[in-house]
Image: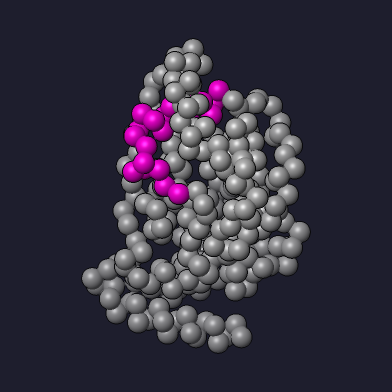
């Protein structure tokens, strides 16, 4: 089955390579692919599975479940809603890991190995072979000076709370603990019940800084009910929501939250 899958993947990617002159993103490097397969089997297969479907040997005991790559949907990106991530986006996840999951920091991989495993991961989904699924990364503004200190952040907390209560609390809950009234009924494209983030935590899966939260508000999380608010909220409103979230953070070790036992994917 492994040889059959490899043959089919190569045949399909070879067709894509015919268009490489017009779209370099669709080109295929067999040598890099083969190296990536080796890196994947040494580091990733135990969780993500030989078929890239998130059903590796360890997956049944993991919460959240490992990501399936077969749908070509990735949550953490700098690209617009429903678009594929850039290689740098994938590189950031591989090297930096995802807080609160079994996805650790693969800092032992060198740059070439990371490039290779990215090439291999792309072979699991046909979305990577269609130009319309790509987009240039968005440009994000620098965080405003006032957001770095509690005293200068304070005037923005109240309007941020109003926005949060009207837009975010239905999923994330009025207490920011991920227990909003609609949370139990949420579904993602993988058929899981995703747990909205407990925004009181010091460390979030998207990253710890205000810019990381701004990025998620702008891009959304593909495959989940967390849509993009880039066209719904102004920049100022997004920063105000972040100011409110930061005012509710609890310093110290991770807060225990029973809702985190859901089988949602990374």
Residue drawn at 69 percent across, 56 percent down? 263
Q: Is residue 177 left or right of residue 32?
A: right
Q: Position of residue 15 (x, y in %)?
A: 35, 82
The N terminus: image quadrant: bottom right
Residue 131 location in percent, x, y?
31, 67
- Please determine whether, in this image, residue 38 is positioned above or below residue 86: below
Q: Residue 84, percent across and down?
A: 41, 59
Q: Coloured how?
A: one colour
Look at 39% across and 30% down and name the residue there.
237
Q: Residue furthest top?
A: 151
Camera sees residue 42: no
Residue 229 lies, with reference to residue 63, above or below; the image says above
Name the residue rendered at 60%, 37% in the picture: 173
Answer whether residue 231 is magenta in the image: yes
List x then y, in percent, for residue 193.
63, 55
Tell me what residue is drawn at x 37 percent, y 52 percent. 80
Where residue 50 sits, quadrant-wise, is bottom right
The magenta stretch spans residue 78 = no
The quadrant of the picture occupied by the C terminus is bottom right
Residue 199 in view here: yes
Q: How many marks?
A: 0
Q: Nearer the viewer, residue 133 or 21?
A: 133
Q: Which residues are magenta?
A: 227-247
């Amino acid at each position: 089955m492994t040889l059959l899958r490899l043959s089919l993947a190569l045949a399909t990617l070879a067709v894509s390579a015919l268009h490489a002159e017009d779209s370099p993103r669709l080109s295929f490097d067999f040598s890099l692919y083969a190296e990536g397969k080796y890196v994947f089997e040494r580091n990733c297969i135990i969780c993500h599975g030989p078929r890239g479907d998130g059903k590796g040997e360890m997956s049944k005991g993991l919460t959240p479940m490992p990501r399936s790559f077969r749908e070509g949907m990735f949550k953490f990106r700098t690209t617009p809603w429903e678009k594929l991530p850039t290689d740098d986006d994938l590189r950031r996840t591989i090297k930096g890991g995802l807080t609160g999951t079994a996805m650790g920091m693969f800092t032992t991989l060198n740059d070439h190995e990371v490039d290779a495993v990215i090439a291999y991961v792309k072979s699991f989904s046909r979305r990577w072979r269609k130009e319309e699924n790509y987009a240039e990364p968005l440009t994000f503004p620098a965080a405003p000076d006032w957001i770095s200190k509690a005293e200068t952040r304070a005037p923005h907390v109240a309007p941020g709370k109003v926005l949060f209560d009207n837009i975010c609390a239905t999923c994330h809950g009025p207490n920011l603990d991920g227990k909003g009234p609609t949370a139990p009924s949420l579904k993602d494209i993988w058929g899981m019940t995703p747990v909205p983030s407990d925004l009181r935590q010091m460390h979030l899966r998207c990253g710890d800084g205000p810019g990381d939260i701004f990025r998620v508000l702008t891009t959304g999380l593909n495959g989940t009910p967390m849509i993009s608010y880039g066209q719904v909220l102004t920049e100022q409103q997004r920063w105000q929501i972040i100011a409110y979230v930061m005012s509710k953070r609890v310093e110290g070790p991770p807060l225990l939250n029973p809702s985190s036992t859901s089988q949602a994917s990374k």
